[in-house]
Image: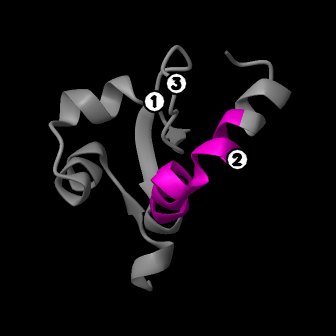
């Protein structure tokens, strides 16, 4: 299976983002502002690298106005 198609676990995403796994887990909650894209399969969190990379691009400082607009349209704060 190609790397871009393989699903990552919580530990792999945490290592990729250089964050503690607990922080990544908290970022999967709808209560958080920047919800990290994830799947829940069999009760376990899974992530696609391509989704994480797109999410990081959206969080880039240059995209903050677009992100704020998307949050308003979606009913966020």
Horizontal side of 77 relative to 60 (left or right) equals right
9 up-or-down from 32: above or below: below
Residue 61 belongs to the span the image colors magenta: yes
The residue drawn where x is 52% and y is 13% is 31
In this rendering, is residue 15 above or below 71? Answer: below
**Secondary structure under badge 2?**
helix
Label drawn at residue 9? none
Residue interval drawn in magenta:
51-68
Residue that badge 2 annotates: 66
Q: Which image quadrant is residue 69 in?
A: top right
Mark 2 against mark 3, which lies toward the viewer? 2
Q: Earlier in the sequence, mark 2 or mark 3?
A: 3
In magenta stretch: residue 60: yes
Residues under numbered marks 2 and 3 in contact, where contact means CB atoms less than 8 Å apart:
no
Name the residue carrying label 1. 28
Neighbour tally class for label 1: few under 14, some 14-19, many 20 plus, Cα within 10 Å? some
The residue that label 3 is drawn on is 33
């Amino acid at each position: 299976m190609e790397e871009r198609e393989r699903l990552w676990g919580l530990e792999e995403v945490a290592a990729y983002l250089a964050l503690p796994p607990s922080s990544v887990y908290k970022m999967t909650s709808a209560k958080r502002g920047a919800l990290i894209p994830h799947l829940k399969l069999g009760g376990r969190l899974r992530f696609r690298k391509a989704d994480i990379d797109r999410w990081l691009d959206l969080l880039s400082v240059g995209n903050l106005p677009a992100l704020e607009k998307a949050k308003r349209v979606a009913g966020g704060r």
